[in-house]
Image: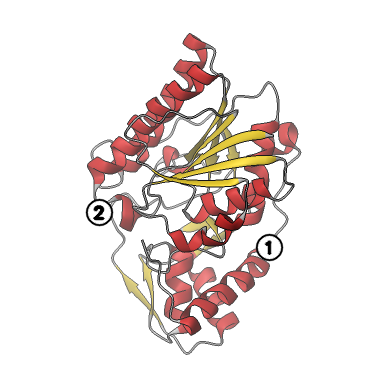
Amino acid sequence: MNRILVTGGAGFLGSHLCERLLEDGKNFVICVDNLYTGSMNNILYLNKNPNFEFIRHDVTQPLYVEVDQIYNLACPASPAHYQKNPIKTAKTSVLGAIHMLGLAKRVGARILQASTSEVYGDPSVHPQPESYHGNVNTTGIRSCYDEGKRMAETLFFDYHRQNAVDIRVIRIFNTYGPRMDPADGRVVSNFIVQALKNNDITIYGSGEQTRSFCYVDDLIDGMIRMMECKGITGPVNLGNPAEFTMMELAEMIIRMTKSSSRIVHMPLPDDDPVKRKPVIDLAQKDLGWMPSVTLEQGLRETIRYFRSIERLGKTCER
């Protein structure tokens, strides 16, 4: 049995990853989370599985376990969360990477870093290939996350070159699906919650800025393929190259929820990227990976999830 550590395992992506890794019965999964943004609600059902263990731990502190693989997902990922405590966010990315790489070095584990499309900043190159070095503001309100993730990538490749640590680095573009926190401030969750309540849908700026949305099941499949693929360190973009404006997304969600919401415009936040779309040629060539879930298909499942938690009166308890 592979012993697999997932940091940030009680979060949106982490809980889906833990679930997928447990499906075939061949892995023992250790889920680590400090529950700063993760939720026990996301993993309660996994506690019944004898091959699952939860450890409440903050990756800014060392961790000593015996594992074969490490997925390092620990870090607040939405602007509302990572800007709430920017110093903590930077520490989680940098110290977390140092401690997980140190663990991988000690036990000889393969380690995957969940990096982000935010390393490209507000890109001057569109769409964004992995060879693009980005346009990041080092002193802005998003810098704690953007620069923290960039530094984590640097550490991964230095540990690989200096200590022969077996690394994998992926850059995740906007991902959505069930188990998103309704209060995380991300555009998909914001629009769906507002639409279900028939509140005004808030668009920042003109609404012509674009994003590319990847359904969570597709993303997790790519993540596992990257971990299992031999001889590839990355970085590799993982995202859906279908590009939509914020206006298109809002109108689609209003239509699918049969909402009476109106669209209102607010000032664009500082450093908010105008364009975001991945080049996924490397993922297609090296991993045989291509997202298969369309935005409308994925939104249908996500809206169903948000309807269910609204009906049950559930919140994201931490």
**Can you say whether 212 is above or below 111 in the image?**
below
Query: What's the distance in space between the residues labelled 2 and 1, CA to CA?
Result: 32 Å
Residue 294: assigned label: 1
Q: Residue at x 65, y 24 (%)?
A: 232
- Farthest residue to the bottom: give it: 260
Residue 84: assigned label: 2
In which quadrant of the rendered image does the N terminus lie? top right
**Can you say whether 123 is above or below 286 in the image?**
below
**Can you say whether 47 is above or below 2 in the image?**
below
Query: Is mark 2 in CB contact (under 8 Å) with mark 1?
Result: no
> In the depicted view, which residue is nearer to us: 193 or 73?
73
Q: Residue at x 46, y 17 (%)?
A: 159
Q: Along the horizontal axis of the image, is 110 left or right of 314? A: right
Q: Position of residue 214 (x, y in %)?
A: 60, 55
**Which colouring convention does the figure follow?**
secondary structure
Q: Amino acid at mark 1?
A: Thr
Q: Amino acid at mark 2?
A: Lys
> In the depicted view, which residue is nearer to us: 31 or 86?
31
